[in-house]
Amino acid sequence: MQPIDQFHTDMNPESARAQMPNRAPGTGALAVEARFVRALIGMNLASAMEYRASFLTQIVFMFVNNGIYFVFWLLFFERFGNVGGYVIHDVYLLFAVVAMGFGLGTLLAGNTGQRLAYLIAQGRLDYYLVLPRPVLLHVLFSHMTVASFGDVAFGLLALGFSGYHAPVELGFYGLAVVAVALIYTGYMTLAGSLAFFFGNAEYVSAQLNMAMLTFSLYPHGLFGGGARLLLYTLLPASFIGSVPVALIQARSLGLLAGLWGVALVSCAVGAIVFAYGLRRYESGSALNVNV
Amino acid sequence: MDQFARAPVDSVDGGVPQVGTAAKVFLKYGSILYINLKNQLAYVWDALGRAFFIVVILYIFVQLWTAVYASQGSAVIAGLSLAATIWYFLVAEMIELGKFRHDVRISSEVKDGSIAYALVRPYHYLVYHFFNGLGETVMRMGLVLGFGLPVALYYGGVPPIQWATVPLVLLVLGLALLLDFIMASAIGLLAFVTEETASFRLIYQKLIFILGGLLLPLDFLPDWLQGPARILPFGLVTYAPAKLLVAFDMTQCLQVLGLQAVWITALGTGLLLQYNWAVRRLAVNGG
């Protein structure tokens, strides 16, 4: 989980479109878009794996990167026992949730946050606007952050250490991390879309990304008052860290439903702000090449 | 920017013939530092935005360590009070967030070939980069300190600093930046061999996080790790200046200065050998 990763691959959505099956009679529009997204992800993956050495290096180093924070917490708990109501196994679970949720989000829908802000500011949405697909969906899934495979792998390792292995806990975990990925993607879509209104929003979205990740990886009990309110509203880091941890530990269907509600709201807000901002979008005269 | 860097250098060489060689060298690299500092001031809003992250980081550390001191029921842990710990993290983060990423600049110049242009200019490539980065470092550290100061003052109170020892701490800080420059430059020059150096940078950064005392002061590490961490160069970059500022100890200061001298000599020699080897390996094609 690197706030500003430097490992990106782009793919040409045209190639993906060429592989898409034609719309079968009677098939719903939703199924068609789902196949389109699946084709984009498949092409992103194929593109990333073209450079095997780079692919593996990025994954391994992201894994190592996350491991260092793990080492910090190991040393911390060895020395101090517990903090903010958390013991080491809670931190394992926290890492399992955040690494997997964040990893899934940036792996599959990599054009959010800083990258989305860049595309908007540089007039690179032109490419997507002239094609007969939902613009936001097309943009978001046209990029895969390869290093996020390392996050996903790390999430699984942390889950292994956490001790939450009962089938029902794994079920809660699976549903929670998908919701976390949606919350993160929705929020970072909103952050990137700020570029429609402020011009250059790359830095703001990068800062929001870093703040979200940083706050989500610390025990919730540390923060009180105004900070806690902030972490449930303007910077919803609690929803990608402590809330999923609490619902898995308590096996709470109510909390899980609430988390999914937040996920849907987050995606809806992201999509609405993007759609509203798109009306203000101004194309540039620069020649852009999508490789 | 490099074009502007030439002007004061030339004026030094041509306009002040009476000054000695050492003074000329000092003026030349001083001008490089000054020009980079001016360049940074031109983009002060960007730098302000970057520095703001210290508020987030410091706030989290304050909450974390307040909880730790409360749970331990002790006013002092491993010789550090809560106030000293808060100020320690401000200084450690100031160094980490403020220091110039020499490895990124050097590896970029190696990869795109612009190192060839830098090598023909009338300065030593490595010394130029040190002073060029120092200008930016000074400004970034100042901004990080400016943003972090209110948070540290609010939660930690007046810093537990012995003001008479500040010059010695500044010396340790200066040597720390030189040591960091040496290690970062060595990583940057690895681009001659590996082309991509981001992974080495990542490892170096993470070593600073743990063995350098950025996430946890070395005094809080388990005994088996403290010994090696105190000798290795990573702690001399971040931990040493921060710890000496908030809890100065003359014996420790002398040990740190000695270790810094040893590491700077050893790693500096290695860097020069690496640089000379790399320059011989450089092939420039016209175009």
Image: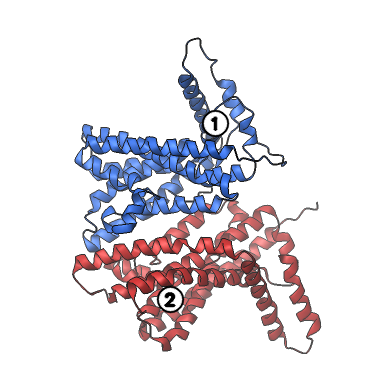
Chain colours: A blue, B red
- Secondary structure under tag 2 reads helix
Q: Is residue A219 visible?
A: yes
- Secondary structure under tag 1 reads helix
Image coordinates for residue B66, horizontal then vertical, percent: 27, 66
Comparing B56 with B195, the one in front is B56
Residue density around tag 2, few if under 14, some if 14–19, many if 20 or more, within 10 Å: many
Q: Is residue A223 visible?
A: no
Which corner quadrant of the image does residue B166 belong to? bottom left
Q: Which residue is painted at 41% across and 84% down in the image?
A: B254
Q: State the CA–CA distance, disc 1 to disc 2.
A: 50 Å
Chain hosting mark 2: B
Question: What residue type is disc 2 on?
Answer: Pro
Question: What residue type is disc 1 on?
Answer: His
Residues marked 1 and 2 touching at CB (< 8 Å): no
Image coordinates for residue A148, horizontal then vertical, percent: 45, 42
Residue, disc 2: B241
Image coordinates for residue B167, horizontal then vertical, percent: 47, 85
* The N terminus of chain B - image quarter: bottom right
Q: Which residue is painted at 37% across and 44% down in the image?
A: A99
Image coordinates for residue B78, horizontal then vertical, percent: 26, 74
Q: Using the image, determine if residue B271 lies above or below residue A139.
A: below
Residue, disc 1: A138
